Amino acid sequence: MYKHALLIFSFVYFNTALASEKQCFIDLEENINQVQLKVKKTDIKGGRLYEYELINRVSSELRSFVIGLGKVNENIQIFEANIPKLVKSPDNWKGSVIFPEKGLYMHLYWRATKPESYIESGKNLQGFRIELPENNFIKTEAIYTDGNKIKVVDYANMPFTAYFADGKCYWGKVFVP
């Protein structure tokens, strides 16, 4: 097995937010539990709220992360029930929904707006939140015009990739404690 693997994202984005994240090295032997993304999922009036806490155990500062990309990518289909109606961030962080050009999929992306806001090694940061609209499609089958089934996403069970100041990235799976 290779100790290092180069992960290259070959997507072209309408929004250039992920331009600096196009390639990174993942140390396949050291990524387990190096970075974690905990989530609390709550049903609220008119939708569902996901509140995330990011935990950095890597020796470098964490500068951004993407939900929906990881060792195994989980394609988040562009579908009204999957698109957050609200994306919130801690102070000095910015969250976005990223839509790849000519694609049927999207990703959630958060980044520190300045280096002083990077998450230091051994620290946690809370305040990453998304709110989804009320989903009436869980009990019925919804399909695209091409006949493919629409997959309703559970954002509490998604891969993510975290990017660090030293150029490395680590992947993991969102988890409910």
Image (cartoon, helix red, strand yellow):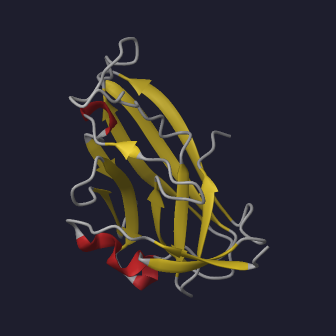
Seen as rendered, the residue at the extreme bottom is 166
Residue 87 located left or right of residue 34 = left
Among the 4 quarters of the image, the one containing residue 96: bottom left
Residue 88 seen from this side: yes
Residue 89 seen from this side: no
Seen as rendered, the residue at the extreme front is 146
Q: Position of residue 11 (x, y in %)?
A: 34, 67
Task: Pick the quarter of the image with the C terminus.
Answer: top right
Q: Position of residue 19 (x, y in %)?
A: 33, 77
| Camera-side residue of 177 and 32 | 32
Residue 8 located left or right of residue 32 = left
Q: Position of residue 16 (x, y in %)?
A: 25, 73
| Camera-side residue of 154 and 134 | 154
| Camera-side residue of 44 and 101 | 101
Vertical placement of residue 28 versus 69, above or below: below
| Camera-side residue of 91 and 166 | 166
Q: Position of residue 17 (x, y in %)?
A: 29, 71
